[in-house]
Image (cartoon, grey):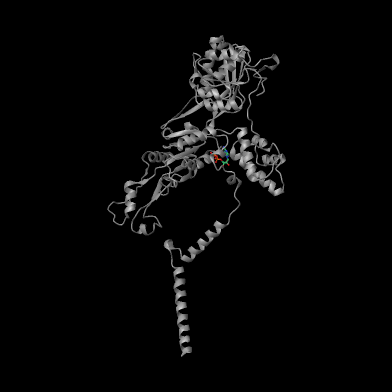
Protein backbone atom coordinates (compact mmCIF):
# COMPACT_ATOMS: atom_id res chain seq x y z
CA UNK A 1 0.00 0.00 0.00
CA UNK A 2 2.72 2.30 1.06
CA UNK A 3 4.62 1.29 -2.06
CA UNK A 4 1.45 1.69 -4.25
CA UNK A 5 0.91 5.25 -2.85
CA UNK A 6 4.45 6.23 -3.51
CA UNK A 7 4.37 4.91 -7.12
CA UNK A 8 1.15 6.85 -7.76
CA UNK A 9 2.62 9.97 -6.19
CA UNK A 10 5.77 9.66 -8.28
CA UNK A 11 3.72 9.24 -11.48
CA UNK A 12 1.55 12.22 -10.54
CA UNK A 13 4.59 14.34 -9.78
CA UNK A 14 6.14 13.31 -13.10
CA UNK A 15 3.03 14.38 -15.05
CA UNK A 16 2.82 17.63 -13.08
CA UNK A 17 6.50 18.41 -13.79
CA UNK A 18 6.09 17.70 -17.52
CA UNK A 19 2.99 19.90 -17.64
CA UNK A 20 4.77 22.74 -15.87
CA UNK A 21 7.75 22.47 -18.24
CA UNK A 22 5.41 22.45 -21.26
CA UNK A 23 3.63 25.61 -20.14
CA UNK A 24 6.89 27.34 -19.17
CA UNK A 25 8.53 26.51 -22.52
CA UNK A 26 5.41 27.60 -24.39
CA UNK A 27 5.24 30.90 -22.54
CA UNK A 28 8.95 31.59 -23.37
CA UNK A 29 8.23 31.00 -27.03
CA UNK A 30 5.07 33.15 -26.92
CA UNK A 31 5.63 36.30 -28.96
CA UNK A 32 5.78 39.57 -27.02
CA UNK A 33 4.59 42.89 -28.46
CA UNK A 34 6.38 43.53 -31.75
CA UNK A 35 6.53 39.81 -32.56
CA UNK A 36 9.66 39.06 -30.45
CA UNK A 37 9.58 35.84 -28.48
CA UNK A 38 10.38 36.13 -24.79
CA UNK A 39 13.41 33.86 -25.43
CA UNK A 40 14.75 36.41 -27.85
CA UNK A 41 13.90 39.16 -25.38
CA UNK A 42 15.90 37.39 -22.61
CA UNK A 43 18.83 36.95 -24.94
CA UNK A 44 18.86 40.62 -25.92
CA UNK A 45 18.57 41.71 -22.29
CA UNK A 46 21.49 39.51 -21.32
CA UNK A 47 23.62 40.95 -24.14
CA UNK A 48 22.72 44.48 -23.06
CA UNK A 49 23.63 43.71 -19.47
CA UNK A 50 26.97 42.28 -20.59
CA UNK A 51 27.66 45.40 -22.68
CA UNK A 52 26.94 47.58 -19.65
CA UNK A 53 29.54 45.72 -17.61
CA UNK A 54 32.22 45.96 -20.33
CA UNK A 55 33.81 49.39 -19.70
CA UNK A 56 37.01 51.02 -20.88
CA UNK A 57 38.92 53.28 -18.51
CA UNK A 58 37.58 56.79 -18.00
CA UNK A 59 39.07 59.05 -20.70
CA UNK A 60 41.30 61.84 -19.44
CA UNK A 61 38.91 64.38 -20.95
CA UNK A 62 36.31 63.12 -18.43
CA UNK A 63 38.76 63.03 -15.53
CA UNK A 64 39.93 66.59 -16.15
CA UNK A 65 36.50 68.12 -16.82
CA UNK A 66 35.97 71.03 -14.40
CA UNK A 67 33.82 69.92 -11.45
CA UNK A 68 33.05 73.40 -10.15
CA UNK A 69 32.87 76.86 -11.68
CA UNK A 70 36.02 77.74 -9.74
CA UNK A 71 37.93 75.20 -11.87
CA UNK A 72 37.08 77.01 -15.10
CA UNK A 73 40.20 78.99 -15.83
CA UNK A 74 40.52 82.41 -17.47
CA UNK A 75 36.78 83.12 -17.83
CA UNK A 76 36.13 85.04 -14.60
CA UNK A 77 34.10 87.81 -16.26
CA UNK A 78 31.95 85.39 -18.25
CA UNK A 79 31.32 83.16 -15.22
CA UNK A 80 30.24 86.19 -13.19
CA UNK A 81 27.86 87.17 -16.00
CA UNK A 82 26.53 83.58 -16.12
CA UNK A 83 25.89 83.58 -12.37
CA UNK A 84 24.14 86.95 -12.59
CA UNK A 85 21.91 85.78 -15.42
CA UNK A 86 20.91 82.38 -14.02
CA UNK A 87 21.36 82.28 -10.25
CA UNK A 88 19.01 85.10 -9.23
CA UNK A 89 15.28 85.03 -8.44
CA UNK A 90 14.44 85.63 -12.10
CA UNK A 91 16.77 83.53 -14.28
CA UNK A 92 17.22 84.65 -17.90
CA UNK A 93 17.66 82.77 -21.15
CA UNK A 94 21.32 82.89 -22.14
CA UNK A 95 23.41 82.83 -25.31
CA UNK A 96 27.08 82.00 -24.85
CA UNK A 97 29.53 83.01 -27.58
CA UNK A 98 33.20 82.06 -27.81
CA UNK A 99 35.84 80.13 -29.72
CA UNK A 100 35.88 76.30 -29.54
CA UNK A 101 37.24 74.53 -26.46
CA UNK A 102 37.35 77.44 -24.01
CA UNK A 103 34.89 76.19 -21.39
CA UNK A 104 31.41 77.17 -22.67
CA UNK A 105 29.90 73.70 -22.32
CA UNK A 106 31.78 72.99 -19.10
CA UNK A 107 30.38 76.18 -17.52
CA UNK A 108 26.84 75.56 -18.78
CA UNK A 109 26.88 72.05 -17.29
CA UNK A 110 27.75 73.43 -13.86
CA UNK A 111 25.64 76.55 -13.62
CA UNK A 112 22.29 74.90 -12.79
CA UNK A 113 23.74 73.14 -9.72
CA UNK A 114 25.26 76.49 -8.70
CA UNK A 115 21.87 78.19 -9.12
CA UNK A 116 20.17 75.56 -6.93
CA UNK A 117 22.45 76.58 -4.05
CA UNK A 118 21.13 80.14 -4.23
CA UNK A 119 18.24 80.75 -1.86
CA UNK A 120 16.08 82.96 -4.06
CA UNK A 121 16.44 80.84 -7.19
CA UNK A 122 13.23 79.20 -8.50
CA UNK A 123 14.85 75.89 -9.65
CA UNK A 124 13.73 72.87 -7.62
CA UNK A 125 16.24 70.41 -6.23
CA UNK A 126 15.09 67.91 -8.89
CA UNK A 127 15.37 70.41 -11.80
CA UNK A 128 17.02 68.74 -14.79
CA UNK A 129 19.85 69.87 -17.07
CA UNK A 130 18.97 68.58 -20.53
CA UNK A 131 21.69 68.77 -23.16
CA UNK A 132 21.22 68.54 -26.89
CA UNK A 133 23.54 69.29 -29.80
CA UNK A 134 21.94 71.21 -32.66
CA UNK A 135 24.33 69.66 -35.20
CA UNK A 136 22.79 66.24 -34.54
CA UNK A 137 19.19 67.42 -34.88
CA UNK A 138 18.17 66.62 -38.39
CA UNK A 139 15.18 68.64 -39.47
CA UNK A 140 12.36 66.35 -40.53
CA UNK A 141 9.60 68.13 -42.43
CA UNK A 142 7.15 65.30 -41.77
CA UNK A 143 7.77 65.71 -38.06
CA UNK A 144 7.85 61.96 -37.50
CA UNK A 145 10.61 62.21 -34.91
CA UNK A 146 11.74 65.45 -33.33
CA UNK A 147 13.96 65.00 -30.26
CA UNK A 148 13.89 68.74 -29.56
CA UNK A 149 10.23 69.74 -29.88
CA UNK A 150 8.61 66.30 -29.56
CA UNK A 151 6.37 64.51 -32.06
CA UNK A 152 3.21 62.46 -32.30
CA UNK A 153 3.33 58.74 -32.91
CA UNK A 154 0.33 58.27 -35.15
CA UNK A 155 -1.69 55.02 -35.27
CA UNK A 156 -0.66 54.34 -38.88
CA UNK A 157 2.90 53.55 -37.83
CA UNK A 158 4.06 50.01 -37.62
CA UNK A 159 4.51 49.20 -34.00
CA UNK A 160 2.10 51.84 -32.72
CA UNK A 161 1.08 49.06 -30.31
CA UNK A 162 -2.24 48.62 -28.58
CA UNK A 163 -2.96 52.36 -28.82
CA UNK A 164 -2.30 52.21 -32.54
CA UNK A 165 -4.80 49.42 -33.04
CA UNK A 166 -7.40 51.53 -31.24
CA UNK A 167 -6.63 54.53 -33.48
CA UNK A 168 -5.07 56.59 -30.67
CA UNK A 169 -2.28 59.08 -31.56
CA UNK A 170 0.48 59.14 -28.93
CA UNK A 171 2.34 62.39 -28.08
CA UNK A 172 6.10 61.87 -27.60
CA UNK A 173 7.56 64.79 -25.61
CA UNK A 174 10.93 66.18 -26.72
CA UNK A 175 13.82 67.85 -24.88
CA UNK A 176 11.81 71.05 -24.30
CA UNK A 177 9.37 69.13 -22.07
CA UNK A 178 12.06 67.02 -20.46
CA UNK A 179 13.80 70.25 -19.39
CA UNK A 180 10.59 71.64 -17.83
CA UNK A 181 11.50 73.36 -14.57
CA UNK A 182 15.23 73.23 -15.36
CA UNK A 183 17.72 74.16 -18.06
CA UNK A 184 17.76 73.22 -21.72
CA UNK A 185 21.30 73.50 -23.09
CA UNK A 186 21.57 73.59 -26.89
CA UNK A 187 25.19 73.34 -28.01
CA UNK A 188 25.97 74.89 -31.41
CA UNK A 189 22.58 76.63 -31.34
CA UNK A 190 23.56 78.60 -34.45
CA UNK A 191 23.19 75.39 -36.49
CA UNK A 192 19.46 74.95 -35.77
CA UNK A 193 17.28 74.79 -38.88
CA UNK A 194 15.30 78.07 -39.26
CA UNK A 195 12.00 76.19 -38.79
CA UNK A 196 13.27 74.62 -35.56
CA UNK A 197 14.51 78.04 -34.44
CA UNK A 198 11.06 79.57 -35.01
CA UNK A 199 9.35 76.76 -33.12
CA UNK A 200 11.80 77.21 -30.26
CA UNK A 201 11.08 80.96 -30.12
CA UNK A 202 7.36 80.19 -29.85
CA UNK A 203 7.99 77.80 -26.97
CA UNK A 204 10.13 80.40 -25.17
CA UNK A 205 7.19 82.76 -25.46
CA UNK A 206 4.34 80.36 -24.51
CA UNK A 207 6.25 77.95 -22.24
CA UNK A 208 4.01 75.20 -23.60
CA UNK A 209 4.71 72.41 -26.10
CA UNK A 210 1.81 71.88 -28.50
CA UNK A 211 1.04 68.60 -30.29
CA UNK A 212 -1.10 68.09 -33.37
CA UNK A 213 -2.31 65.05 -35.23
CA UNK A 214 -4.94 64.53 -37.88
CA UNK A 215 -5.79 61.29 -36.03
CA UNK A 216 -6.81 63.19 -32.92
CA UNK A 217 -10.51 63.72 -32.26
CA UNK A 218 -12.05 65.25 -29.15
CA UNK A 219 -14.96 62.83 -29.57
CA UNK A 220 -12.83 59.68 -29.56
CA UNK A 221 -13.83 57.94 -26.33
CA UNK A 222 -10.96 55.44 -26.69
CA UNK A 223 -8.41 58.15 -26.10
CA UNK A 224 -7.31 58.30 -22.45
CA UNK A 225 -8.00 61.60 -20.69
CA UNK A 226 -4.29 62.43 -20.24
CA UNK A 227 -3.79 62.31 -24.01
CA UNK A 228 -6.90 64.48 -24.48
CA UNK A 229 -5.39 66.97 -22.04
CA UNK A 230 -2.03 67.02 -23.86
CA UNK A 231 -3.68 67.68 -27.24
CA UNK A 232 -6.03 70.29 -25.86
CA UNK A 233 -3.82 72.19 -23.40
CA UNK A 234 -0.30 71.28 -24.48
CA UNK A 235 2.50 70.07 -22.22
CA UNK A 236 4.43 72.35 -19.86
CA UNK A 237 7.83 73.41 -21.26
CA UNK A 238 8.93 76.14 -18.87
CA UNK A 239 12.72 76.04 -18.84
CA UNK A 240 15.62 78.42 -19.14
CA UNK A 241 17.53 78.09 -22.39
CA UNK A 242 21.30 78.19 -22.57
CA UNK A 243 22.55 78.20 -26.15
CA UNK A 244 26.26 78.04 -26.97
CA UNK A 245 27.84 78.92 -30.30
CA UNK A 246 31.20 79.56 -31.91
CA UNK A 247 29.50 81.84 -34.42
CA UNK A 248 29.45 85.64 -34.34
CA UNK A 249 26.43 87.35 -32.74
CA UNK A 250 25.50 88.76 -36.17
CA UNK A 251 24.96 85.15 -37.42
CA UNK A 252 22.31 84.45 -34.77
CA UNK A 253 18.67 85.42 -35.49
CA UNK A 254 17.90 88.78 -33.83
CA UNK A 255 14.60 87.38 -32.50
CA UNK A 256 16.53 84.84 -30.40
CA UNK A 257 19.21 87.32 -29.36
CA UNK A 258 16.62 89.79 -28.13
CA UNK A 259 15.18 87.18 -25.76
CA UNK A 260 18.54 86.21 -24.25
CA UNK A 261 21.31 87.64 -22.12
CA UNK A 262 24.46 87.43 -24.23
CA UNK A 263 27.68 86.26 -22.60
CA UNK A 264 31.09 86.15 -24.24
CA UNK A 265 33.77 83.60 -23.40
CA UNK A 266 37.28 84.77 -24.26
CA UNK A 267 39.96 82.90 -26.10
CA UNK A 268 42.39 81.65 -23.47
CA UNK A 269 45.72 83.39 -23.01
CA UNK A 270 49.01 81.62 -22.31
CA UNK A 271 48.65 81.89 -18.55
CA UNK A 272 45.19 80.27 -18.61
CA UNK A 273 46.38 77.43 -20.88
CA UNK A 274 49.36 76.84 -18.57
CA UNK A 275 47.03 76.64 -15.58
CA UNK A 276 44.72 74.15 -17.32
CA UNK A 277 47.77 72.06 -18.29
CA UNK A 278 49.02 72.11 -14.69
CA UNK A 279 45.61 71.08 -13.31
CA UNK A 280 45.25 68.26 -15.84
CA UNK A 281 48.78 66.91 -15.30
CA UNK A 282 48.20 66.93 -11.54
CA UNK A 283 45.01 64.91 -12.02
CA UNK A 284 46.96 62.38 -14.14
CA UNK A 285 49.38 62.04 -11.23
CA UNK A 286 52.46 61.86 -13.48
CA UNK A 287 55.53 63.99 -12.65
CA UNK A 288 56.75 66.27 -15.45
CA UNK A 289 59.78 68.28 -16.37
CA UNK A 290 59.84 71.85 -15.06
CA UNK A 291 58.55 74.30 -17.68
CA UNK A 292 56.47 71.68 -19.53
CA UNK A 293 53.20 73.60 -18.98
CA UNK A 294 54.66 76.76 -20.57
CA UNK A 295 55.75 74.67 -23.52
CA UNK A 296 52.30 73.11 -23.87
CA UNK A 297 50.88 76.66 -24.00
CA UNK A 298 53.00 77.25 -27.13
CA UNK A 299 50.94 74.60 -28.94
CA UNK A 300 47.47 74.63 -27.36
CA UNK A 301 44.86 77.21 -28.42
CA UNK A 302 42.30 76.39 -25.75
CA UNK A 303 41.38 74.00 -22.97
CA UNK A 304 40.36 71.13 -25.24
CA UNK A 305 43.68 71.19 -27.12
CA UNK A 306 45.49 71.21 -23.79
CA UNK A 307 43.62 68.20 -22.45
CA UNK A 308 44.14 66.32 -25.74
CA UNK A 309 47.90 66.96 -25.70
CA UNK A 310 48.13 65.79 -22.09
CA UNK A 311 46.12 62.69 -22.88
CA UNK A 312 48.68 61.76 -25.56
CA UNK A 313 51.60 62.61 -23.24
CA UNK A 314 50.29 60.41 -20.45
CA UNK A 315 49.55 57.53 -22.86
CA UNK A 316 53.10 57.79 -24.21
CA UNK A 317 54.55 57.80 -20.70
CA UNK A 318 52.57 54.66 -19.77
CA UNK A 319 53.47 52.87 -23.01
CA UNK A 320 57.18 53.57 -22.69
CA UNK A 321 57.24 53.06 -18.93
CA UNK A 322 58.55 56.58 -18.32
CA UNK A 323 58.32 57.93 -14.81
CA UNK A 324 58.34 61.55 -15.89
CA UNK A 325 56.97 63.46 -18.88
CA UNK A 326 59.82 65.21 -20.68
CA UNK A 327 60.08 68.01 -23.27
CA UNK A 328 61.10 65.44 -25.88
CA UNK A 329 57.76 63.66 -25.34
CA UNK A 330 55.92 66.91 -26.03
CA UNK A 331 57.97 67.46 -29.20
CA UNK A 332 56.95 63.99 -30.37
CA UNK A 333 53.25 64.59 -29.58
CA UNK A 334 53.34 68.00 -31.31
CA UNK A 335 54.97 66.50 -34.38
CA UNK A 336 52.70 63.48 -34.72
CA UNK A 337 49.56 65.48 -33.85
CA UNK A 338 50.57 68.24 -36.31
CA UNK A 339 50.28 70.91 -33.61
CA UNK A 340 51.72 74.19 -34.88
CA UNK A 341 53.40 76.63 -32.47
CA UNK A 342 50.99 79.50 -31.82
CA UNK A 343 52.10 83.00 -32.63
CA UNK A 344 50.87 85.11 -29.71
CA UNK A 345 51.67 88.58 -30.86
CA UNK A 346 53.44 90.94 -28.45
CA UNK A 347 53.79 94.56 -29.45
CA UNK A 348 57.22 95.80 -30.38
CA UNK A 349 58.88 98.32 -28.10
CA UNK A 350 60.32 99.98 -31.17
CA UNK A 351 58.74 103.04 -32.71
CA UNK A 352 58.17 102.60 -36.43
CA UNK A 353 57.33 104.80 -39.37
CA UNK A 354 54.10 103.79 -41.07
CA UNK A 355 53.31 100.88 -38.74
CA UNK A 356 50.61 100.90 -36.04
CA UNK A 357 48.66 98.37 -33.99
CA UNK A 358 44.94 98.22 -34.75
CA UNK A 359 42.58 96.52 -32.31
CA UNK A 360 40.03 94.15 -33.86
CA UNK A 361 37.58 91.37 -33.02
CA UNK A 362 37.73 88.00 -34.70
CA UNK A 363 35.28 85.08 -35.03
CA UNK A 364 33.54 84.20 -31.76
CA UNK A 365 33.93 87.78 -30.53
CA UNK A 366 37.45 87.53 -29.13
CA UNK A 367 39.79 90.51 -29.42
CA UNK A 368 43.05 90.58 -31.35
CA UNK A 369 45.77 93.01 -32.39
CA UNK A 370 46.28 93.69 -36.05
CA UNK A 371 49.37 95.25 -37.58
CA UNK A 372 48.63 97.96 -40.14
CA UNK A 373 51.42 99.05 -42.47
CA UNK A 374 51.46 102.05 -44.80
CA UNK A 375 53.91 103.39 -47.36
CA UNK A 376 53.57 106.70 -49.20
CA UNK A 377 55.57 107.60 -52.32
CA UNK A 378 55.54 110.69 -54.55
CA UNK A 379 53.96 109.94 -57.90
CA UNK A 380 52.64 111.67 -61.04
CA UNK A 381 49.17 110.55 -60.25
CA UNK A 382 47.42 109.42 -57.12
CA UNK A 383 47.14 105.68 -56.58
CA UNK A 384 45.76 103.66 -53.69
CA UNK A 385 46.52 100.00 -53.09
CA UNK A 386 45.00 98.13 -50.16
CA UNK A 387 45.99 94.54 -49.43
CA UNK A 388 44.89 92.04 -46.80
CA UNK A 389 41.27 93.21 -46.56
CA UNK A 390 37.96 91.74 -47.64
CA UNK A 391 37.30 93.63 -50.90
CA UNK A 392 33.61 92.91 -51.20
CA UNK A 393 30.96 91.90 -48.69
CA UNK A 394 27.77 89.97 -49.23
CA UNK A 395 24.67 91.31 -47.52
CA UNK A 396 22.08 88.61 -47.08
CA UNK A 397 18.44 89.58 -46.77
CA UNK A 398 15.40 87.33 -46.40
CA UNK A 399 14.48 87.51 -50.06
CA UNK A 400 17.77 88.28 -51.79
CA UNK A 401 21.42 88.94 -51.23
CA UNK A 402 23.56 91.71 -52.69
CA UNK A 403 27.25 92.62 -52.76
CA UNK A 404 28.84 95.89 -51.84
CA UNK A 405 32.32 97.36 -51.58
CA UNK A 406 33.62 96.37 -48.13
CA UNK A 407 33.39 98.84 -45.27
CA UNK A 408 37.13 98.58 -44.74
CA UNK A 409 37.83 99.65 -48.33
CA UNK A 410 35.50 102.70 -48.10
CA UNK A 411 37.07 103.59 -44.79
CA UNK A 412 40.54 103.81 -46.42
CA UNK A 413 39.16 106.35 -48.88
CA UNK A 414 37.77 108.40 -45.98
CA UNK A 415 41.21 108.34 -44.38
CA UNK A 416 42.84 109.91 -47.46
CA UNK A 417 40.18 112.62 -47.62
CA UNK A 418 40.73 113.52 -43.95
CA UNK A 419 44.51 113.60 -44.50
CA UNK A 420 44.10 116.41 -47.04
CA UNK A 421 43.53 118.72 -44.08
CA UNK A 422 47.12 117.90 -43.00
CA UNK A 423 48.72 118.86 -46.32
CA UNK A 424 48.46 115.46 -48.02
CA UNK A 425 47.50 115.72 -51.73
CA UNK A 426 45.69 112.55 -52.81
CA UNK A 427 46.67 113.06 -56.46
CA UNK A 428 50.38 113.34 -55.81
CA UNK A 429 51.10 110.12 -53.91
CA UNK A 430 51.02 106.38 -54.29
CA UNK A 431 49.68 104.99 -51.05
CA UNK A 432 49.86 101.33 -50.12
CA UNK A 433 48.11 100.09 -46.97
CA UNK A 434 48.64 96.48 -45.95
CA UNK A 435 47.10 94.28 -43.27
CA UNK A 436 49.65 91.47 -42.88
CA UNK A 437 48.94 88.23 -41.06
CA UNK A 438 45.93 86.88 -42.94
CA UNK A 439 43.21 88.07 -40.50
CA UNK A 440 40.45 89.20 -42.87
CA UNK A 441 39.54 92.85 -42.14
CA UNK A 442 35.98 93.69 -43.09
CA UNK A 443 34.82 96.50 -40.84
CA UNK A 444 35.42 100.25 -40.58
CA UNK A 445 36.82 100.12 -37.04
CA UNK A 446 40.42 100.25 -38.29
CA UNK A 447 39.75 103.81 -39.56
CA UNK A 448 41.82 105.82 -37.10
CA UNK A 449 44.60 103.22 -37.06
CA UNK A 450 44.91 103.48 -40.87
CA UNK A 451 44.86 107.25 -40.56
CA UNK A 452 47.76 107.19 -38.12
CA UNK A 453 49.77 104.73 -40.22
CA UNK A 454 49.43 106.84 -43.39
CA UNK A 455 50.05 110.08 -41.46
CA UNK A 456 53.25 108.58 -40.05
CA UNK A 457 54.42 107.33 -43.45
CA UNK A 458 53.62 110.70 -45.06
CA UNK A 459 55.34 112.85 -42.41
CA UNK A 460 58.14 110.39 -41.62
CA UNK A 461 57.41 110.58 -37.89
CA UNK A 462 57.64 107.26 -36.07
CA UNK A 463 54.75 105.89 -34.00
CA UNK A 464 55.28 104.40 -30.55
CA UNK A 465 55.13 100.59 -30.88
CA UNK A 466 53.33 100.17 -27.57
CA UNK A 467 50.13 101.98 -28.52
CA UNK A 468 47.01 100.48 -30.14
CA UNK A 469 43.89 102.03 -31.62
CA UNK A 470 40.32 101.37 -32.66
CA UNK A 471 37.64 103.70 -34.02
CA UNK A 472 35.81 104.56 -37.21
CA UNK A 473 36.83 107.77 -38.92
CA UNK A 474 34.29 110.32 -40.20
CA UNK A 475 34.97 112.59 -43.20
CA UNK A 476 35.48 115.55 -40.86
CA UNK A 477 38.00 113.63 -38.79
CA UNK A 478 35.55 112.63 -36.05
CA UNK A 479 36.29 109.39 -34.19
CA UNK A 480 33.09 107.34 -34.31
CA UNK A 481 32.08 104.53 -31.91
CA UNK A 482 32.74 100.87 -32.76
CA UNK A 483 31.82 97.44 -31.32
CA UNK A 484 33.77 94.94 -29.25
CA UNK A 485 35.89 97.47 -27.34
CA UNK A 486 36.14 95.43 -24.09
CA UNK A 487 37.47 92.39 -26.01
CA UNK A 488 39.81 94.56 -28.05
CA UNK A 489 41.22 96.14 -24.89
CA UNK A 490 41.63 92.66 -23.36
CA UNK A 491 43.77 91.65 -26.34
CA UNK A 492 45.76 94.91 -26.09
CA UNK A 493 46.54 94.22 -22.43
CA UNK A 494 47.70 90.67 -23.27
CA UNK A 495 49.94 91.94 -26.07
CA UNK A 496 51.72 94.40 -23.77
CA UNK A 497 50.15 97.64 -25.08
CA UNK A 498 50.80 100.65 -22.81
CA UNK A 499 48.29 103.15 -24.26
CA UNK A 500 45.07 102.33 -26.11
CA UNK A 501 42.99 104.90 -28.01
CA UNK A 502 39.25 104.38 -28.32
CA UNK A 503 36.25 106.52 -29.39
CA UNK A 504 34.96 108.77 -26.62
CA UNK A 505 31.50 107.27 -26.90
CA UNK A 506 32.90 103.84 -26.11
CA UNK A 507 34.48 105.02 -22.86
CA UNK A 508 33.62 103.24 -19.59
CA UNK A 509 34.83 103.95 -16.05
CA UNK A 510 35.91 100.31 -15.67
CA UNK A 511 38.70 100.89 -18.22
CA UNK A 512 40.54 102.82 -15.48
CA UNK A 513 41.26 99.45 -13.82
CA UNK A 514 42.83 97.72 -16.83
CA UNK A 515 46.38 98.53 -15.86
CA UNK A 516 47.04 100.39 -19.13
CA UNK A 517 46.20 103.94 -20.12
CA UNK A 518 42.95 104.01 -22.14
CA UNK A 519 42.50 107.35 -23.92
CA UNK A 520 39.06 108.43 -25.22
CA UNK A 521 39.07 110.47 -28.46
CA UNK A 522 36.60 112.83 -30.10
CA UNK A 523 38.62 113.45 -33.28
CA UNK A 524 41.92 112.72 -34.98
CA UNK A 525 43.41 116.09 -33.92
CA UNK A 526 43.29 114.80 -30.36
CA UNK A 527 44.89 111.56 -31.52
CA UNK A 528 47.85 113.34 -33.14
CA UNK A 529 48.20 115.57 -30.09
CA UNK A 530 48.44 112.55 -27.76
CA UNK A 531 50.68 110.40 -29.95
CA UNK A 532 53.19 112.99 -31.09
CA UNK A 533 53.32 115.50 -28.22
CA UNK A 534 56.88 115.01 -27.03
CA UNK A 535 56.34 115.07 -23.27
CA UNK A 536 53.50 112.53 -23.40
CA UNK A 537 55.20 110.14 -25.74
CA UNK A 538 56.68 107.67 -23.29
CA UNK A 539 59.01 106.16 -25.89
CA UNK A 540 62.20 108.07 -26.52
CA UNK A 541 62.68 107.52 -30.21
CA UNK A 542 66.34 107.24 -30.99
CA UNK A 543 67.45 107.21 -34.59
CA UNK A 544 68.66 103.61 -34.49
CA UNK A 545 65.34 102.55 -33.02
CA UNK A 546 63.19 103.87 -35.82
CA UNK A 547 62.09 101.48 -38.53
CA UNK A 548 59.98 102.08 -41.59
CA UNK A 549 57.11 99.83 -42.50
CA UNK A 550 59.28 98.06 -45.00
CA UNK A 551 62.09 97.43 -42.52
CA UNK A 552 59.85 96.69 -39.55
CA UNK A 553 59.93 93.12 -38.39
CA UNK A 554 56.41 92.31 -37.23
N1 LIG B 1 38.47 77.61 -19.36
C1 LIG B 1 38.71 76.31 -19.08
N2 LIG B 1 39.11 75.94 -17.85
C2 LIG B 1 39.34 74.64 -17.56
N3 LIG B 1 39.19 73.62 -18.46
C3 LIG B 1 38.79 73.94 -19.70
C4 LIG B 1 38.53 75.30 -20.08
N4 LIG B 1 38.16 75.32 -21.35
C5 LIG B 1 38.17 74.06 -21.79
N5 LIG B 1 38.56 73.22 -20.80
C6 LIG B 1 38.74 71.76 -20.95
O1 LIG B 1 38.40 71.41 -22.29
C7 LIG B 1 37.23 70.56 -22.32
C8 LIG B 1 36.33 71.00 -23.43
O2 LIG B 1 35.80 72.30 -23.14
P1 LIG B 1 34.29 72.71 -23.47
O3 LIG B 1 33.55 71.54 -24.04
O4 LIG B 1 33.70 73.38 -22.30
O5 LIG B 1 34.55 73.76 -24.64
P2 LIG B 1 33.51 74.60 -25.47
O6 LIG B 1 33.90 76.02 -25.32
O7 LIG B 1 32.11 74.24 -25.11
O8 LIG B 1 33.85 74.14 -26.95
P3 LIG B 1 32.87 73.86 -28.22
O9 LIG B 1 32.40 75.19 -28.70
O10 LIG B 1 33.78 73.20 -29.20
O11 LIG B 1 31.76 72.97 -27.73
C9 LIG B 1 36.60 70.71 -20.93
O12 LIG B 1 35.93 69.54 -20.54
C10 LIG B 1 37.80 70.98 -20.04
O13 LIG B 1 38.45 69.79 -19.66
Whether residue 340 can be seen here: no
Looking at the image, which residue sits at the far bottom? 1
Residue at the image point whose x is 48% and y is 29% from the top: 394
- Tell which of 151 and 537 is nearer to you: 537
Residue 110, given in percent of the width and then of the height, sits at 51, 42
Residue 348, given in percent of the width and then of the height, sits at 65, 22
Q: Is residue 311 left or right of residue 254?
A: right
Vertical placement of residue 145 versus 453, above or below: below
Residue at the image point whose x is 55% and y is 15% from the top: 527
Looking at the image, which residue sits at the far front? 119
The quarter holding residue 297 reads top right
Residue 266, given in percent of the width and then of the height, sits at 55, 33
The quarter holding residue 255 reads top left
Vertical placement of residue 228 versus 512, above or below: below
| Tally of marks | 0
Q: Is residue 177 left or right of residue 108?
A: left
Image quarter in which the C terminus is found: top right
Looking at the image, which residue sits at the far left? 219
Q: Quadrant of ligand 1?
A: top right
Q: Is residue 292 left or right of residue 515?
A: right
Residue 219, given in percent of the width and then of the height, sits at 27, 53
Q: Is residue 36 left or right of residue 100?
A: left
Whether residue 385 can be seen here: yes
- Tell which of 450 and 269 is nearer to you: 269
Vertical placement of residue 174 versus 20, above or below: above
Residue at the image point whose x is 44% and y is 77% from the top: 19
Amino acid sequence: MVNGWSVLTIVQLLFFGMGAYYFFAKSRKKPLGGGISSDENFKQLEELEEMRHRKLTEPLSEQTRPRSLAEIVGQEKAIKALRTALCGPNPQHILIYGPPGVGKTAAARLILEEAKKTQACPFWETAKFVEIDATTLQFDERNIADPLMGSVHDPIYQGAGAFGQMGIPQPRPGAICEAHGGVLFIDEIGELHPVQMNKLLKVLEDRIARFQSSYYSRQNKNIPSYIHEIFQKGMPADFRLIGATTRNPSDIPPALRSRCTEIFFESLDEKAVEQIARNSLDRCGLPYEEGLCQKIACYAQGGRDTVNIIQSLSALAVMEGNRKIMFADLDWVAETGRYQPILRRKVSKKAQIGVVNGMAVQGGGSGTLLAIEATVQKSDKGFLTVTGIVEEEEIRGKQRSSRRKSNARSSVENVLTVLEKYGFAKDAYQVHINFPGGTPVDGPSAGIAMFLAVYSAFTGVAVDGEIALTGEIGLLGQVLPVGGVPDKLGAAVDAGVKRAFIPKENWRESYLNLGISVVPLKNVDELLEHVFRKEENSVVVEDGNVLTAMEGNL
